[in-house]
Amino acid sequence: MRAVILAAGLGTRLEPLTLGRSKGMISVANKPLLHWIASGFGDAIIVARRDQTDILEHFSGREIVFQEEPKGTADALLSAKGSVDGDFVVVNGDDLFSGEDIRKFVGSKGCGIAVSKHETPEMFGSVETEGEKISKILEKHPSGKGMVNCGMYRLDERIFKYLKKIDPSGRGEYELTDSINLAVKDGVYFDAVEVEGWQTVSHPWDILDANAKVLQETGSIISESAEIRPGAFIEDPVAIGGNTVIGPNCYIRKFSSIGAGCRIGNAVEIKNSVIMENSHVSHLSYVGDSVIGKNCNIGAGTIFANLRLDDGEVSMGIKGEKVLTGRRKLGSIIGDNVKIGVNVTLMPGRKIWPGMMVPPCFLVKEDMAKQPSLRL
């Protein structure tokens, strides 16, 4: 069954990592997020924008159709109308599923929606059901009741007439879920298919969970050209890219991914973190529960703090608002091309924008979107 992957979204909630790359090109276990989504389907096409050159180059061997304007998920699917017939699957470009879940979903008959239980259902769209039948999809459910909509749909050609009948949503977009609600009102039966291996990537901290999910399924992925120097200790599963050097006496803890061309200095500890290609972490540093973009340089003795002193839930700024992350441990999110001086400490839940230079001995207490003074 052919899959349509909707990857044209802007990914603003994932800033600063999407300030220079498409959301689907964020590194998970040293490959783009879209790679892991597409690999679950034998035949998949990608809906993208023409300006997403990173997707176009990386997936040049796959069929790509273009959404000319960012008008929402219904409009995105309409862009793929000429590439599908009969039954097909639609999956959001930021939702990961286990192989078992995909086989179960694709093997079912008729129209359906993947649903799941979640610890914080109020953060997601949810579904109302009558037995195993979908009766309505809700954009958000303030009471936190009901099953969560996981962003994978089994559809047929009937959906296309409903894509053209809806009005823009409150955020000015044409939503696929509104089209499905219209189809349900017309008597089209949608099955609720519960899945267990779903992981969304809608916020920066979700990257850590997605990375762990993939590594749990694949096991360790260590390049033959990676150099692991004496005294380094590595816990499975991890991903270490080609031509990366892990210095002596390092501790690389499980669910960490270190991209190609990285240098990890003497006695560095990396815990449950994602470090993208060509970044350097100098000696005697600690990186915990954090994401570091590509081409970064982290000075000696830098500490990515990941635990509040009061042991409380870590919050993070998302589009101008403080959002609770649901995580007791969360470090920092660092954009591309950042340079951090020696002996810097970053407080939990902080973000640094691409290209920033952090002065030596600096305490990063707030998000850094503007360059601070480098005068000592």
Image (cartoon, rainbow, N blue to C red):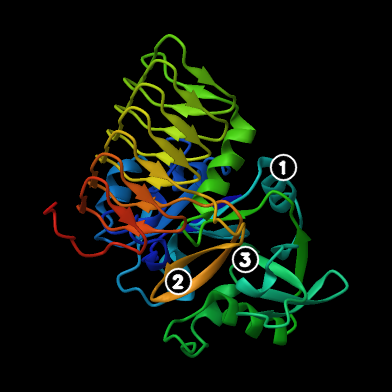
Q: From the top left corner, tell me how far across and down residue 216 is, in percent.
A: 63, 34
Q: From the top left corner, tell me how far across and down residue 131 is, in percent.
A: 88, 72
Residue at 71% over, 87% down: 185
Horizontal placement of 191 versus 205: left or right? right
Establish if 371 lies above or below 355. below
* SS category of the residue bearing label 1: helix
Amino acid carrying mark 1 in the image? Glu
List the residue tagged with mark 1.
100
* SS category of the residue bearing label 2: helix
Q: Nearer the viewer, residue 117 or 333?
A: 333
List the residue tagged with mark 2.
78
Q: Circle 2: is it few (<14), some (14-19), or many (20+) Cα within 10 Å?
A: some
Question: How far, Cα to Cα, is label 1 from label 2?
Answer: 28 Å
**Which mark is nearer the camera, 1 or 3?**
1
Question: How far, Cα to Cα, is label 3 from label 2?
Answer: 13 Å
Amino acid carrying mark 3 in the image? Asp
Question: How far, Cα to Cα, is label 1 from label 3?
Answer: 22 Å
**Mark number for residue 156?**
3
Horizontal placement of 190 versus 56: left or right? right
Q: Nearer the viewer, residue 233 or 211?
A: 233
Establish if 109 lies above or below 209. below
Q: From the top left corner, tell me how far across and down residue 343 is, in percent.
A: 30, 41
Residue at 34% over, 22% down: 244
